[in-house]
Amino acid sequence: MTSLLSATLVLVVAAGVGPAVEVRSPSGDLVLTVGLRDFGDERGCPYYRLAAGGRTVLTDSRLGLDLEPEALASDLVVARVARSRGDAMWRPVCGERAEVRDRYNAVRFELVERRRRSRRLELDFRVYDEGIAFRYTLPEPSNVGAFTIVAERTQFAFAGDHPAWAVYRAQGRYDVGPVPISRIAPGAERPLTVELATDLFAAVAEARCVDYARMKLRRADDCPQTLEVFLDAERGRAGRVVGKTPFTSPWRVVMVADSAGRLLENDDLILNLNDPCALADTAWIRPGKVMREITLTTDGGKACVDFCSRHGLQYILFDAGWYGPEGDGRSDASAVDPKRAGVLDLREVIGYGREKGIGVILYVNRRALEKQIDRIFPLYESWGVKGVKFGFVNVGSQHWTAWLHEAVRKAAAHHLMVDIHDEFRDTGYRRTYPNLMTVEGIAGNEEFPTPSHNAVLPFTRFLTGPADYTYCWGSARLRVTHAHQLALSTIDFSPWQMLFWYDRPGQVRVDQALDYWKALPTCWDETRVLEGRIGRCVSIARRSGADWFVGTINPGGGEVRLPLSFLEPGRKYLATIYGDDEADGSHPGGVEVKRIAVDRGTVLKPRMPVNGGQAVQLVRFGRPDETR
């Protein structure tokens, strides 16, 4: 990390409620106010409010912790206020941008109880141009000692009953559209995106949840447009958090932008709230495209290796069943299932893949992981396995949150990359342990969602980071065109992209359209949102080196204008355009491929069918101002 600026100013406030403190973002557009006030019969309660460009984002919103047996949320006074600021640049190992700027103004509120002066609570706030974040610390010295948090008093008090995109499972479907905040049921997932106006959006999220119960959201009983934090546990039960001081909670985050697209362009805010990379050596962490092997045979594995070598993929994945029934606790993930030993020589496939530059990833269900993790990770490393896909993990409670993150650290110790499947959503830990390549937490092509769902995901689910969407090509169950699929693989970010999910090598026919996936990178130097109408139209441009890839989907169909003004001035580019071929009646969903020369003055105007899409590869050629 390159530190550009770090400074602290301490203001000592006399014991008492004290005046509210205002903190502005570096640009001055966001204004956070923090202080103490009365809420009903309770005095000295911490609160905050937020404005953007002079408009209210959040009104006075309560803060505090419900500790057992007595809450730490009222009758507080300010002991000290410390202001600080930071400005640094850092480079992700695998990201949507080559560099990330971490710039904010901050304040720390140190609070003590009015009566006893022994129990203390610290509130840290950061104000970025991209949003705000805050967290709780139970410091030492304090007589809190060992503690149990049974709930948070954390609120997000919106000024109106705004529309929001809510789901209640990490793999929930967004195609029902937005609902008013007042209609949000308990247990809404994070992030929760809210439209305050046509030019003002917010998203409530969580960052650095490593040893804590997962945050979910519910409507406050006394105010239907106020959301509050609900600590999760297994099967929707209320969670608890136990620990000893000093202890710090995850960050609670409110992203703010003038468009839905800008929210996505600012999603590095979640990474900035996590610790820097803990690994001295990251050269072994390699992004890439993955094909699933489902025959669980040596011949099938080699066929996948050959397919990947021809089509520009970097990994194969042996999916569930290679070591036995995944749901059977007796299955041993340290060896091939004895019933399959005659047809699957895993070590032979790994060696064959090594010769052709194709790595092997192994699926392991959480039952085997929980029992065998300390045995199988060093074993897989010795075999030459490149990564592990965790299946059907437990999520929600503090225990399972801590277990999962420890599992990622253990994988890193044995040079294993990780894909966590099912209900887990990352909160930015991949900055600290970048061997966490991707996670599921999404309704992807295993569920064949609607095109409108796909057009909501970038501005909701993908604000948390990468997702393993599991793209298909030949499946008749697809509800979109093939051009839509190509575009979606660019719109959706994941350092590991699972392609051809329900396809086998022998089933994939020769198709010029697949040249796009062959060329497609999975990590990027720059990302721009060209069009961002939630649920209706999405266009995202991503750069790798000198070349750009643009994915556009338009579920409702019709023309989309795509100015290429992001291209380098004075340069010509060869645009290879993959669009819907509506004239190909013999192959519904077929892709038409055409090539044209373009520059930054070009405006593409694709006209798409319903549920269609377009993918474009832009390759720079020639010297500046050279024409063809």
Image (spheres, grey):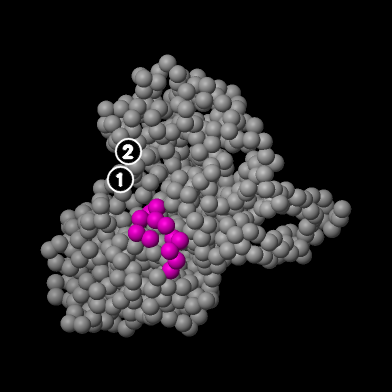
- The reply, left or right, for residue 609 in relation to residue 472 is right
Where is residue 234 drawn, in percent x and y?
25, 51
Left or right position of 482 against 386: right
Compared with 243, 291 (above or below) is above
Mark 1 falls on what kind of element?
Answer: loop
| Helix, strand or loop for the magenta stretch, by majority | loop
Q: Residues within 10 Å of mark 2 (few under 14, many from 20)?
A: many
Give 60 or 146, whichever is nearer the viewer: 60
Q: What residue is pinned by disc 2?
A: 366
Identify the residue at image location x=33%, y=30%. 325
Res. 375 mark? none
Asked whether, in this view, residue 68 is left or right of residue 205, the answer is: left
For this orientation, the residue located farthest to the front is 585
Q: Is residue 445 above or below residue 350?
A: below
Left or right of residue 601: residue 157? left
Residue 173 in magenta stretch: yes
Residue 172, position as x, y percentages in the image: 39, 56
CB of mark 1 within 8 Å of CB of mark 2? Answer: yes
User: Which residue occupies 68% across, 53% down?
Assistant: 582
Magenta segment: 167-178
Residue under pointer 1: 394
Give the residue displayed 65% in from the left and 41% down from the top: 514
Rendered residue at 40%/44% (across/down): 421
Name the residue nearer the viewer: 502 or 461. Answer: 502
Q: Amino acid at mark 2?
A: Arg
Position in image of residue 509 (x %, y %): 64, 35
Dot 1 or dot 2, earlier in sequence: 2
Magenta stretch: residue 241 in it? no
